């Protein structure tokens, strides 16, 4: 450990739980889920229009709506949309469960803690289960997002470091925001407005 790392400016201790895991995975997959939902909704609207048009045709001509194979394909498409919609809604929960299973297999624990020591020039992350240390300069962070309970630091290499908002020692959340605004001026920041 370097001399200037012996006393961090402040620290954060984060012990994940199911709620924070869901928030993290929800934030990670947010854009992908939104795009998928928009595309599926456009397809759903088209299928619904076609189905209504087919029902209207059947009533006007006296034909049988249910004898048309096309109608069954349209209804199947609408059912698939409903399934995709539900899967998108529960995706963060499923990913959080998978993450807990992976942690149990790797470390024998459901979740592992991360301690983050903030220094003037870098952050040192300490994995409590593996005793691994990683030192990252502030310049590697490209995006900072905030959820209800977490602050997520996104590196340019798509690594995500989670910080628990209730785990700060030596600084509060507004003070942390100010600190990161100074240290990462080029990072995109999405701070919560309600906090």
Image: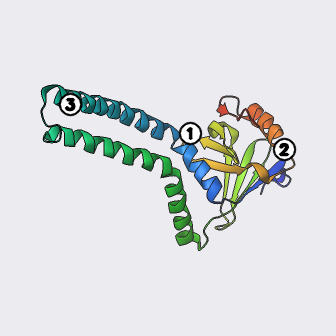
Side of 79 relative to 30 (left or right): left
Residue 19 is labelled as: none
Q: Which residue is mark 1?
A: 156
Q: Earlier in the sequence, mark 1 or mark 2?
A: 1
Residue 160 x/y as whole percent: 59, 47
Count of all numbered marks drawn on residues in the image? 3
User: Above or below — where is 187 with respect to 11?
Assistant: above
Q: Which residue is mark 3?
A: 54
Taking the spot 54% from the left edge, 44% from the top edge, the residue there is 28
Q: Position of residue 4 (x, y in %)?
A: 83, 49
At 79% from the left and 36% from the top, the residue drawn is 179
| Residue 186 rendering spot, x and y as whole percentages | 66, 29
Q: Quadrant of the C terminus?
A: top right
Label pair 1/2, CB-CB below 8 angstroms: no
Residue 155 or 194: which is nearer the viewer? 194
Question: Distance between the Cα atoms at labels 3 and 2?
Answer: 60 Å
Left or right: where does residue 133 sit relative to residue 13?
left
Name the residue: 59% across, 74% down: 108
CA–CA distance in space, label 1 to label 2: 26 Å
* Disc 3 versus disc 1: nearer the observer: 3
Q: Quadrant of residue 122?
A: top right
For marks 3 and 2 on the same chain, the one whose residue lies earlier in the sequence: 3
Tell me the quarter of the image containing the N terminus: bottom right
Q: Is residue 88 visible?
A: yes
Mark carried by residue 172? 2
Mark 3 and mark 2 in contact? Answer it, CB < 8 Å: no
> Compared with residue 129, is residue 64 higher up or lower down, i.e. above or below?
above
């Amino acid at each position: 450990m370097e001399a200037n790392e012996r006393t961090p400016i402040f620290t954060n201790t984060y012990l994940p739980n199911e709620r924070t895991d869901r928030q993290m995975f929800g934030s990670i997959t947010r854009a992908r889920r939104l795009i998928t939902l928009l595309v599926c909704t456009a397809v759903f609207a088209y299928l619904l229009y076609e189905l209504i048009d087919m029902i209207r045709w059947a009533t006007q001509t006296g034909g049988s709506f249910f004898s048309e194979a096309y109608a069954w394909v349209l209804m199947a498409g609408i059912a698939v949309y409903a399934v995709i919609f539900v899967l998108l809604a529960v995706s963060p929960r499923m990913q959080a469960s998978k993450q807990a299973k992976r942690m149990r297999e790797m470390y024998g624990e459901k979740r592992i803690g991360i301690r983050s020591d903030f220094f003037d020039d870098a952050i040192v992350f300490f994995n409590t289960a593996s005793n691994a240390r990683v030192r990252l300069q502030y310049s590697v962070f490209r995006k900072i997002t905030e959820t209800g309970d977490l602050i997520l630091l996104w590196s340019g290499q798509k690594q995500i470091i989670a910080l628990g908002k209730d785990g700060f020692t030596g600084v509060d959340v507004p003070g942390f925001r100010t600190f990161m605004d100074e240290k990462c001026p080029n990072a995109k920041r999405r701070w919560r407005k309600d906090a």
